[in-house]
Amino acid sequence: MVLDTVLLLALPASGKSEVRKYLAHLSPESAANDFHMGPTVQLDDFPYVHLMRRVDDELMAQGLARIYFEAPDKSFFDRRHWGTLIELLNQDYDDLVAKRQHDVQSAAAWMLERFDRASEVVGADTRTSSIPDAAREKVLAAIEKECRDQLDALVANYPDTLDGKTLVIEFARGGPEGSDLPLPEPHGYKYSLSKLSPALLAKAKVLYIWVTPEESRRKNEARADPDDPGSILHHGVPEYVMRNEYGCDDMDWLEKNARQPGTLPIDRDGTAYDLPIARFDNRVDRTSFVRDDAASWKEEDVRPLHDGLAGALATLANFSG
């Protein structure tokens, strides 16, 4: 059995992006035989977080107020934007299925329109209407290349067909350290998973990369490259955000309150979904070596990662609930 849709979830710097890189590195035979995976098609919400911060940075450079984040190293003004990010992934999935082309003069204007539309779906503050016209033009010019690169990457990601492919969707969610559970909306996986489209929820299975919040913070510091803030593999999350948005998560709580063992109980618009889940235990680091060039990987590092992932993905593939 080839897995259809895998949600790759974990705290920041837990190894999600390294797992994606490793999966993309596999031969088709190894992916199918060892991992129950077809060629992967990958979606990630981090590029949108980065672009929202870029909008804020350009506004601040003009002496104007930020619209998304409280400060360069702080959280969203409106935490419902965690749902905005999920809606952007839903849009990406719809475009991918339809192989929709976007012939737009300004990729930046198209991106801000997407941000507003996704915000409206989840009831979050859109805020871009508050940007004066002259300032907006300067923002659009400053972020045009990054937005065009993101648009081009999305379109290049369209497969001829999803048949036989495995869609991998990556995101991280959590809440303030020391929080009582369940986490209140809009924090946590319970909230964000409930915003996924029914088309995804109907077939998604969850691969959870398990690390402690302390290990997540350690690895976040180790991977951060200030010269490459938009990089999937090397971006760093501010310490304040690590403690106040990712100081804990609700994965244990969801599993313990499942309607069916081995699943996560998610409800959307009155429909109950029980998402199968398997854990890859990365509390003792088995993934950081993947950030290096593949030619330098050592067998004694590769084997624990390979076997651990194979076991977790087999659990998902064989789930018969």
Image (tube, rainbow, N blue to C red):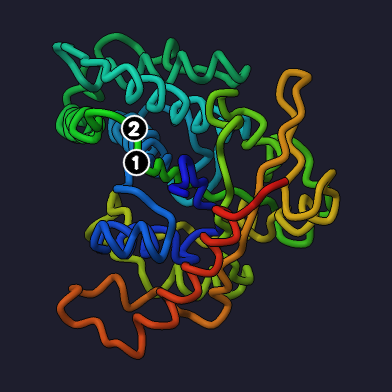
- Dividing the picture into quadrants, the one containing residue 197 is top right
- Secondary structure of the residue carrying tag 2 is loop
Q: Which mark is residue 162?
A: 2
Which residue is tagged 1? 165
- Dividing the picture into quadrants, the one containing residue 66 is top left
Neighbour class for label 1 at 10 Å: few (<14), some, many (≥20)? some
Q: Position of residue 202 (x, y in %)?
A: 60, 30
Say which of 205 and 7 sits in front: 205
Neighbour class for label 2 at 10 Å: few (<14), some, many (≥20)? some
Say which of 15 and 61 sits in front: 15
Say which of 126 and 130 sits in front: 126
Q: Position of residue 64 (x, y in %)?
A: 38, 26
Q: Position of residue 38 (x, y in %)?
A: 34, 48
- Secondary structure of the residue carrying tag 1 is loop
The answer to whether residue 312 is left or right of residue 50 is: right
The answer to whether residue 88 is left or right of residue 25 is: right
In this rendering, is residue 137 above or below 233? above
Identify the amino acid type marked 1. Answer: Lys
Q: Are marks 2 and 1 in contact (CB under 8 Å)?
A: yes
Question: What residue is drawn where x is 76% and y is 59%?
Answer: 252
In this rendering, is residue 43 above or below 175? above
Identify the amino acid type marked 2. Answer: Leu
Question: What residue is drawn where x is 32% and y is 25%?
Answer: 96
Q: Position of residue 259 (x, y in %)?
A: 84, 44
Q: Is residue 135 visible?
A: no
Q: Is residue 208 visible?
A: yes
Whole-number angstrom distance, CA of label 2 to CA of label 1: 5 Å
The answer to whether residue 249 is left or right of residue 181 is: left
Question: What residue is drawn where x is 38% and y is 82%?
Answer: 303
Q: Which mark is residue 180?
A: none
In this rendering, is residue 289 above or below 200? below
